[in-house]
Amino acid sequence: TPEQFESNLDALAKGLVSTGARVVVSNLPDMSLAPVARLAANFLPLPLIVERIGAFNTGVARVVARHGLYGVDLHTPSRVELPAGNFFSADGFHPSDAGYQRMAEHFWPVLLRATEPKAEPTAEPSRATG
């Protein structure tokens, strides 16, 4: 459930932050746009996928804010980029090489910020894109 996901993520974040680590985490891309989602639409309607991703991302945002993590927003750009590119592997679910490259481009500015001396974490996933 989204609640259990948030609880698990919260426990991980708490443990990592307690070590002094700077933690970078992303929200989830809109997986309703994945090719496999269209194949599953008969038993898992796309609006339900969208709703569930939103619930999970709400939990991610709360954990990022609660623990002062560095957030990467993959969801917002995914709504534009996934339909326009070849970002899924042959299984229609996992990223292709181009998908991993694009994810890295979204992570990179946040990773740079997280490694700066006295870097300030974000309160919500970053809108920065590469």
Image (cartoon, rainbow, N blue to C red):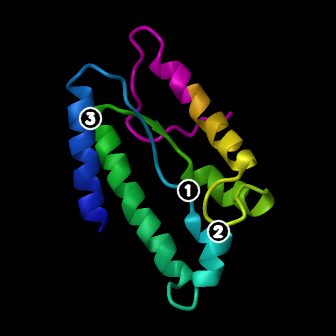
**Quarter of the figure with the N terminus:** bottom left
Closer to the chain start, of discs 3 and 2, is 2
Closer to the chain start, of discs 1 and 3, is 1
- Residue with the mark numbered 3: 67
Instruction: Tell me how far mark 1 sits from mark 3, CA to CA.
Output: 22 Å
Q: Tags 1 and 2 in contact by the CB under 8 Å rule? A: yes
Q: Residue 124, how many percent across, how many down? A: 41, 41
Mark in the foreground, 3 or 2: 2
Q: Would you say residue 17 sits in the magenta stretch?
A: no
Q: Residue 113, how many percent across, how many down? A: 51, 20
Give the vertical position of 34 relative to 121 (above or below): below
> Residue at image x 48%, y 12%?
116
> Is residue 73 something that shows in the picture?
yes
Give the vertical position of 10 relative to 118 (above or below): below
User: Which portion, as a residue range, is magenta?
Assistant: 110-130
> Residue at image x 46%, y 65%?
53
Mark 2, other Cα within 10 Å: few <14 / some 14–19 / many ≥20: many
Question: Is 95 left, or right, of 112 in this rendering?
Answer: right
Q: Amino acid at mark 2?
A: Leu
Helix or strand or loop: what does disc 2 sit on? Answer: helix
Q: Which mark is residue 29?
A: 1
- Residue with the mark numbered 2: 33
Q: Which mark is residue 77?
A: none
Q: Amino acid at mark 3?
A: His
Question: Is 12 left, or right, of 78 in this rendering?
Answer: left
Q: Residue 117, how many percent across, how many down? A: 43, 8
